Structures are given as structure tokens and as C-alpha cells.
Image: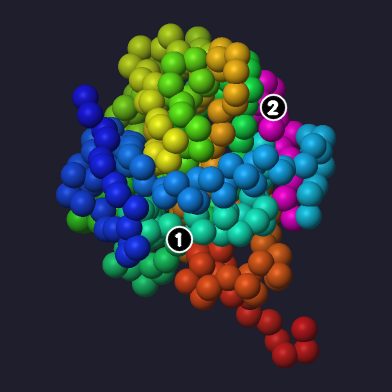
Amino acid sequence: MTTTQHAKPAKAPVAASPMDDYLFDLNGFLIKEQAVEPELIDDLNEAFDNFPDIAPGDWWGNVQRSAGARDPGKQYELQNVIEAGEPFERLIDHPSWIECMRHWAGEEESYVAGLFIDEAFAAKRTEGGFLQVHSGGYRKAMRGQYRYVDGVFRCAQVNVLVALTDIGPGDGGTLVIPGSHKSNFPHPQFEEFRGTQMDGMVGVVAPELHKGDVMIFTDTIAHGAASRTTKDGERRTVIYRYGPAWASTRGGYRYSEELLARLTPERRAILQPIEPRLPPSV
């Protein structure tokens, strides 16, 4: 089974191809190889190198280190990472995927067409940890629903995972169950594996990524992350979750006026698709 599409860095946004649509609908995920240019990957890794050593729950400007409740073994995760430096701003509307996001998650051909980034975080792991299985098409939440109806996609959350390091066996990569985003039945092993590693579940695959690849997946797909057993280095990823313009951040984070003021109009429209409407006296 192949779920990989080759993607060269492009100056102009690249629309979703018929094969992209097919693989995304069939499997719930696809991989675009070398979708992020080496220069930006280098800048993002430099930013990772300079992340502050703060305790879980503490703030660094308008960025917060996650308390790690979802994954007790996660060493470091920064939420609202778009505020962590200019390289992260370049990912907002990256040409390798922004048109795919508008097509799949942006309420295309509707009166509310547009995008919003529901969540943005950077994560690095040295050893151990895992992320338990969650999501799946059975009794899915409306917030992350996957739908294709009347000839258009109506996906409420589509994730873009950027690999800043090679992620292969032992590196603690993302695990998915292809096709589970459209399942009408619960996975028979779901409760058995809840709270544990999902590696042994029937149907699980572990996509391998190279530095600069991106993995795009609907949040409805059953997914998690493997434990990292590699002794050297660390796994580094950035994940941006896109949804329709009327969405709101799950974690309650807000973008600073300083950030919004310096962004291009196109990027600002993604972070703040609906500007506050207030009376003149406020």
C-alpha cells in the first residue's frame, strides 16, 4: 500500500491532485516527500535548539510548555508555537499544503469558506514515552469529523505533521490505522489498548518520514505514537491542525496583537479569519 506523493518545494501553492484526494479519502492520510525546503527545516531546527528550559505548564512569552497530561513520557512540547519565531510563521500558509487544507478543511464552495489553525505545537522526544490510540470514525466528535458529501470535503480538522528529523523504526513515530476515519464500528481491541502502546493493534501501520517530509492526516483517523527506543538524538516534529474559519482553538490560546500586526494579510486571515466586531468606544 502506498500513501506517498512526491512534492518538490514550490513557490506557488500546489493544489490537491486527484491522487491526493484519492489517497486522503481512502486511507485518511498521505505523505508528501521533501515538502519543506531545507532552508526552512534548518531554521526550524535552530529554533528548537534555542527553546528555553522551562517546566511543564510554564510560559515563554505567548507560548506554553504542555503539562504532558496526554503523554506522560513526552519530554518537551510547546503549544501556540506560531508565536515562537518567524520560521513557524512561514508554516502557516506553506505552499506545499495550504491549498490542500482549503480544499479538505476550509468549507470550500460555501458561504463560510476559509481556514483556521485550531492548534499548533512543536514536540521533541529523546527516549521513551508514547501516545495512546485515540479518535477513529466510530462515534467521532463533530469537532474532528471526516465527511465527503455532495462532491465536496467537509473535514473539521486536518493535521500537518512536519518531520524535522528522520523518523523510522525506534524513533517514536506516529502510528495510524488506515481507513479507520470512516469506520462504522469500534476497533475490537480499542479498550484493550487504551492507556497503553497501540503498536500491537491489528491494522496499525508506522509511516516512515525523512527530514523535510510532511504527513497529512484527518484527525478522525485512529492514531497515536510509538515509544522511542533510539538512544541517540531526538525526534522533532511540528504539527499544525487546520479547520474551518468558524472554529476556535481547543486549548483556548490566543494570538498576540504583535504577531497579528506583523503577519501578511493572508497569514493573518488564517489565524484570525473573523475579526472581533466591537463598538467604537471599546
Residue positioned 67% across, 21% down in the render? 73
- Residues rendered magenta in the picture: 62-76
Image side of residue 218 versus residue 83, left or right? left
> What residue would you read off at disc 1?
93
Which residue occupies the foreground of this view, 6 or 73? Answer: 6
- For image coordinates 42% across by 48% down, the residue present is 36
Please name the amino acid that badge 2 sits on. Gln
- Amino acid found under the numbered disc labelled 1: Asp
Does residue 25 appear in this view?
Answer: no
- Say the numbered circle drawn on residue 248: none
Marks 2 and 1 sit apart, C-alpha to C-alpha, by: 28 Å
Residue 75 is marked as 2
Q: Secondary structure at mark 1?
A: loop
Q: Quadrant of residue 279?
A: bottom right
| Residue positioned 58% across, 42% down in the render | 45
**Front residue of this view, candidates 26 and 39:** 39
Q: How many marks?
A: 2
Residue 126 position within the rendered picture, expressed as x and y whole percent measured from the top left: 63, 22
